[in-house]
Image (tube, rainbow, N blue to C red):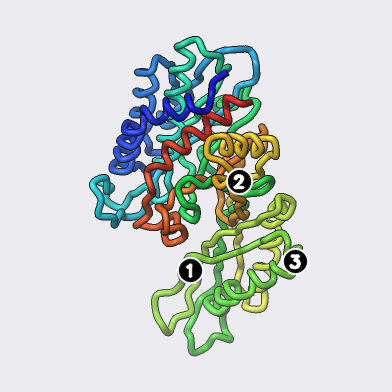
Amino acid sequence: MIEPVEFAERVHARADELVALRRDLHAHPELSGQEVRTTALVADRLRQAGLAPRTLPGGVGVLCDVGSGDGPVRALRADLDALPLSDVKDVPYRSTVAGVTHACGHDVHTAAVLGAGLVLAELAAAGRPIGRVRLIFQPAEEVLPGGALAVIAADGLAEVGRILALHCDPRLTVGQIGLRVGPITAACDHVTVRLSGAGGHSARPQLTGDLVHALGTVINQTPAALSRRVDPRAGLSLVWGRVAAGSAANVIPRTGELEGTLRCLDPATWEMAPMLVTEIVEALVLPYRVAAGVEVLRGVPPCVNESESVRVLREAALVAWGPDSVCGTEQSLGGEDFAWYLLRVPGALARLGVAPPGTAGTLDLHRSDFDVDERAIGIGARLLLGAVLSL
C-alpha cells in the first residue's frame, strides 16, 4: 500500500525540478504540430528515469508506459502546444518566441503529468506494485480536430481502461480541484460561410445581389434562427469571429466570407447542428440573389466525465487535502479534445486551481498575461498519483 504522505514527499522532492521544467517550456513555447523541442525534452527526461518513451509518428508527442502487469492500463494525459499570442508578462521565464506563449497552461499540465510519471518510475524501480500506467503527452490540442486523434491512431489507447487529465482553471485558487460528473466542456466546430454573386455598382443594387447586406443578415439572423430550432437546454451557440468582403465603398463585391465557432453542450444536438446551420444560411440569403457555401469543420465533441473516474479524483483530493479542496465546476462552452478519448474509454478531466490566493477570476485562459501559481504543478502531480494508484 502506497500512502498519500509518500506521494507528498516524493512530489515535494521534485518540486524545484518540475517548476524549472515548466519555466523552460514557458520560455520556449511551440505551436500546435510543431512541438519538436518540447517532445524531445519530455522524452529525454523519461529516458533518464529508465523508461522507454516512444515518439508519435510525425515527431511530436510522446507515449510512455510505466510499470507492468496484466490488468487494464490507466492513462494520464497532458498536452504540449502553446497559443499564437504574445507574452506580455514581466517574468524571468517570459516567452522567447515572438507571438507564441503558453496562455492555456499546457506547460503546467506537462510538468504535472511528467512529475507523476517520474514518481511512478521510482516506485516501479523499487519493486512497488503500481500496475501499468501510460503517460500521454499529446500535440496539437489547440487546433481542430485536435492531436488526441493522432494519439488514438498510434494505438495510444490500446489496453487502456481509464484515462485522467487536468486543465488549469484561473477561476479557482491554487489548492482547489474542480470536479463535475457528465459534460464538462462543449462541442466546438469551425464554421465558414462563403457568399458569391454577380457584384455591381452600389447605385444600382436592384440589378445585382447585395452581397454585403446578405452577409449582415447571416451574421445577425443565423444565431437567432438556430436558437428557435433546437432545445434551449442544448446550449447551442454560434459566434462570428471574422468577416471579409469588398474593397471599395461604392462597389458591391462578388464574394464575401464569414468564420465563426459553433459550440454545443448536448451531443445529440451537436450531431445535427451542421445541417441546421447550412439550411438556415441558404434560406437567409435566397432573397438577395447570392449563393451560399457553408463548411462546418467538425472539431471536438463534448467532454463527458464518467462518474467513477470523478469519484476517484475526488477521493484522492479529499485524502490529500481535505474537504475544502474539492468544489463543483460548471460546464464550459470551451472545446477540449480530451473528449475524443472519453468517447472510447471512461475517464475524467479535473479543473486545477492555479490562481494565487485572492486573485481567482482576475485572469483568464487565452490571454497574453496569463500565468499561474506554480504550486499548482505539485498539486496536480499528487492528485494524479493518488487517483491513478487507487484504480
Q: Amino acid at mark 2?
A: Leu
Would you say 234 lies left or right of 87 here? right
Q: Is residue 57 visible?
A: no
Looking at the image, which residue is at 42% across and 62% down?
362
Q: In the image, which is nearer the foreground, mark 1 or mark 2?
A: 2
Q: Quick one: label 1, few (<14), some, or many (20+) residues within 10 Å?
A: some
Rendered view: 138 above or below 155: below
Percent from the top left, x then y, of residue 371?
A: 37, 51
- What is the count of numbered marks? 3
Q: Amino acid at mark 3?
A: Arg
Q: Nearer the viewer, residue 77 or 7?
A: 7
Which numbered disc, 2 or 3, marks the residue that appears first in the sequence? 2
Give the residue pinned by disc 1.
243
Give the residue pinned by disc 2.
179
Give the residue pinned by disc 3.
229
Quarter of the image for the N terminus: give it. Answer: top right
Question: Rounded to the nearest whole Å, what is the CA distance between mark 1 and mark 2?
Answer: 37 Å
Circles 3 and 1 in contact, beta carbons < 8 Å: no
Question: Which SS class for mark 1?
Answer: strand
Which numbered disc, 1 or 2, marks the residue that appears first in the sequence? 2
Q: Which mark is residue 10?
A: none
Looking at the image, which residue is at 42% across and 27% down?
9
Which numbered disc, 3 or 1, marks the residue that appears first in the sequence? 3
Q: Amino acid at mark 1?
A: Val
Question: Rounded to the nearest whole Å, what is the CA distance between mark 3 and mark 1?
Answer: 24 Å
Q: In the image, which is nearer the foreground, mark 2 or mark 3?
A: 2
Would you say 207 lies left or right of 49 here? right
Question: Rounded to the nearest whole Å, what is the CA distance between mark 2 and mark 3?
Answer: 31 Å
Question: Which SS class for mark 3?
Answer: loop
